[in-house]
Amino acid sequence: MKIGELIIVLDFGSQYSNIIVRRIRHLGVHTILCSHNISIYNILSKKPKGIILSGGPFSVYNNNAPLIYKNILELNIPILGICYGMQLISFLFGGKIESSKNKEYGKSYLKIIDEKNPLFLGIPKKSIIVWMSHSDETKEISEEFKVIGKTTSCSIAAFCHKKKNIYALQFHPEVSHTEFGMLIIKNFILKICKCNANFKLKNIIKKSIDNITKIVSKKKVILGISGGLDSFVAASLIYKAIGDSLHCIFVNNGLLLEEEEKSIDKICSIVKFPINIINAKNQFLSKLTGIIDPEKKRKIIGEEFIKIFEKESKKIKNVEFLAQGTIYSDVIESSKDSSKLSVNPIKSHHNVGGLPKTINLKLLEPLKKFFKDEVIEIGYILGLPKYLLYKHPFPGPGISIRIIGEINEKKISILRKAENILFQELNNYKLYTKLNQAFIILLPIKSVGIMGDKRSYEYTAILRSINTKDFMTATFSNLSYEFLEKVSNRIINEVDGINRMLYDISSKPPSTIEWE
C-alpha cells in the first residue's frame, strides 16, 4: 500500500458511517474510520488524500453536539460533508441551520443545479433519487460557497466552496438507494482526491486468516452455527486458519422454519468442517413462555445460546475462543457506546455485546468489520456454494421475532406453514434469487372473517419482502398483484389460524427489516 493512498472518515455517530468506509473500499482505496475529535497532528501523520465528515443524529446548536476545529477545513485536503457533516461545514463558515418544516426521511429527488461540478460528473440526469435522513437543514451559506443541488423541501441540498475542494451533501450518497450515489463517491475519491485503487478484498482475507492463525495458535475454537451465511463464512475463514481445531455447534432452538432445518442438513453435507447438532427446543420455548417484549426475547435467546456453548465447551479440552458470525450491521444496530456518539441501540443482536463473566473464553469475530455484500464476496472467494451465498438471511433469534407478542407452539406452527407457502410461490414465480429477503410476520391481532359461510376470528399476517445491497438500507419489493394475491389466497385457505393478509411497504429507514 502506497503511503498517502488513504481516506479518513470522521465519525459523528451515523449508523451509515461504516457504509461510507465500505463504499470507498469497494473502489479499491484504503479507508479508515476515526473519531470526530481526532487531532490535526494525527490527521497529518496519516497523510490522507481526502476527509469525509459523516452524518449524525445531532443538531449543530445542541450543547452536546460534536464539533471539529475549523482549521481542519483549512488543511488543503479535499473534504466532503454528508448530512450532519454538511451542516457542520456550513455552521463553521458562518452559515445558518434551522429545524426543517418538512423533515425528509427516505426517498427524495435532487435537482442538480451545477451539472459540470466535478462531484456530479457522468450523471446523465438533472434530477436523481436521493436518500434523506434529516430534521435540520442549511438555510443560508457563506458567500465562499455556492449551491449545486436542491430538493423540493430543501433549497440547499448540495453546495461547494468556490475556490477550495470542499463539498457538502444533505443526502446520503453512500446508501444503495441513492441514484448514482456510488458515482458521486467515486468522483470525490478518484477525481477530486486523486486516489489510486489498490486495496483488494483478497488481500484482506489472507491477512484475516494469518491473524486468526497467530491469535489462536494451538488452542481450540468453538463456534455456533446459526444456519445463515454469516456464521458459515466465519467458520470457513477460521477453518482455513486452524483446521480441525475449530469445533462447530448448531443449536436447534425450536424457532426455525422447516426450510431452515432442511438447509442445515444440506449445508452440513457440503462443508468440510464437522458440525455437532444439539436439540434444545424445549429449553428455549420454556424460557420464552409469557415473554412479549422483543428485547427480552432476544436477550433470553442469547443467554440460552451462551449457556449451551458453555456446557459444550467444557466437553472439549483446551478451548480458549468462542467464535461468532457477527457482521458490521449487527454491531452498528446494537451499538450503545457513547464514545462513538451512538444514540440508543436500534435493537440488540443475540451475538453482539461480548461474553458474560461466567464464560472464560475469548471472543473471536472475524467478520465484525464487514458488511453483508462483503461477506457474500468473501464466501465466494472461499469457495462456498451459491446456494448458501444467496440464501435469504434468517435471524439468529429465529421466528421468535416474527411472532409479535407471546410465543407458543401453535403460533410457531401457523407461521411455519405460512412461510412454506411463501417460499413455494417465490420459487414457482422464480423470484427467490431476485429478492434479498422475504418472510411472514404473525401479528397478535385477530379480525373477523367469513370462511365456508361461517364467522371466523383469526390472526392477521404480514408479508415482508425487501431489496437491498448491504442490509443497512432497504426498500420494499415491487411484487406483482398476481403474486401477492396467489400467496394471500393460499395462506388464508391452507393455514388454519390466519384469515387476513397484509403487505408491508415500508423502507429502512425509517423502519427496520425485521419487525422486532
Image (cartoon, grey):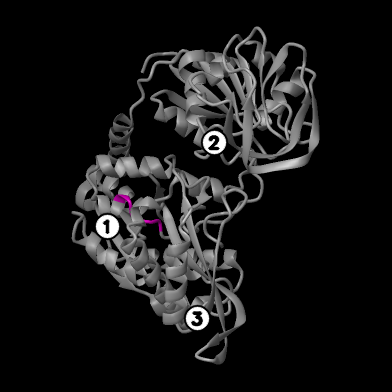
The residue that label 1 is drawn on is 247
Side (left or right) of 325 relative to 460:
left
* Percent position of residue 413, x then y: 43, 79
Q: Quadrant of residue 241?
A: top left
Q: Is 477 situated above or below 316? A: above
Q: Residue furthest top?
A: 163
Residue type pointed to by label 2? Thr
Q: Residue at x 49, y 70 (%)?
A: 400
Report the Cα–Cα distance between label 2 and label 1.
Answer: 42 Å
Residue type pointed to by label 3? Asn
Q: Is 292 situated above or below 45? A: below
Q: Earlier in the sequence, mark 2 or mark 3?
A: 2
Residue range highlighted in magenta: 389-393
Q: Earlier in the sequence, mark 3 or mark 1?
A: 1
Mark 2 or mark 3, whichever is nearer to me: 2
The residue that label 3 is drawn on is 408
Query: Circle 2: is it few (<14), some (14-19), or many (20+) Cα within 10 Å?
Result: many
- Relative depth, front residue between 425 and 103: 425
* Percent position of residue 350, x then y: 48, 59
